[in-house]
Amino acid sequence: MTCYIADSAVFIMGNCNLDSSLMITVPSVADELKSRDSVLRFDLAKEAGLRVEWPEPEMVKEVRRKAEQTRDSEELSKTDIEILAKALEHRDRGVLLTDDYAVQNVAVQLGIQVKPIAQKKIKDIILWQKQCIGCRKTFEKGDVCPICGSPLKKKRKKIIKDKSQS
């Protein structure tokens, strides 16, 4: 049976008409809910069977490794990493519900099925790099150019066509 791993967008947007008893999330999702409506949706989903579980530490490590490879690690919050780890635990029969493009980018590369809530699904997998705004040299990571001292800006390094879209 398919289960759905719910990112905070599920409760913020409120337009996900799925059986709450098939949904799983992580505790830190509740911390991201600011509006009264989103908190109410979360509480109602819990009463209807939403499971709130901590991710397995090994899965968190695997997500961090993959996010480093894609260079999405700077974009991912603690909650993003935890929700990805929980989705990784259920990769064979789970679908990750999220609108976050960095989360989707890492998820697709981990073999996790993704379904957006209100946004469009990503079309391609992107690997990122950093480029100096001064001397234009590129680097794998960092915030300041080690050559000229100018700030580094995130830039697409490589785009891989997502074959699952076909």
Image (cartoon, helix red, strand yellow):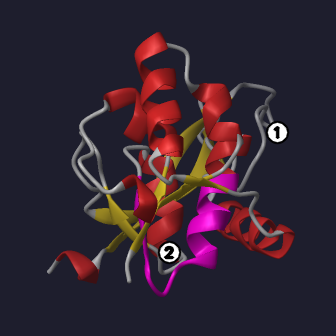
The percent position of residue 25, horizontal first and vertical second, equals: 58, 52
Is residue 12 in view from this perspective?
Answer: yes
Q: Nearer the viewer, mark 1 or mark 2?
A: 2
> Which residue is farthest front?
47
The kind of secondary structure element at disc 1 is loop
At 63% across and 32% down in the image, what residue appears?
30
In the figure, residue 144 lies in which quadrant? Answer: top right
- The local secondary structure at tag 2 comes to helix
| 158 magenta-colored | no
Q: Is residue 20 left or right of residue 18?
A: right
**Vertical placement of residue 121 versus 99, above or below:** below
Q: Nearer the viewer, residue 67 or 50?
A: 50
Dot 1 crowding, Cα within 10 Å, few <14, some 14–19, many 20+: few
Query: Which region is colored magenta?
Result: 82-97
Q: Position of residue 34 (x, y in %)?
A: 55, 15
> Relative to 59, is 122 on the left or the right?
left
User: In this orientation, does residue 134 appear?
Assistant: no
Q: Quadrant of the C terminus?
A: bottom left
Q: Position of residue 15 (x, y in %)?
A: 24, 37
Query: Does the magenta portion include 92?
Result: yes
Which sits in the foreground, 69 or 78? 78
- Distance in Å between CA atoms under marks 1 and 2: 32 Å
- Residue at image x 38%, y 83%? 1
Instruction: Identify residue for label 1.
Output: 147
Residue on which the image places disc 2: 109
Asked if residue 166 is positioned above or below residue 98 in the image, the reply reads below
Can you give x and y, in whole percent of width and height, for residue 84 in the image? 60, 61
Q: Amino acid at mark 1?
A: Ile
Q: Is residue 120 left or right of residue 86?
A: left
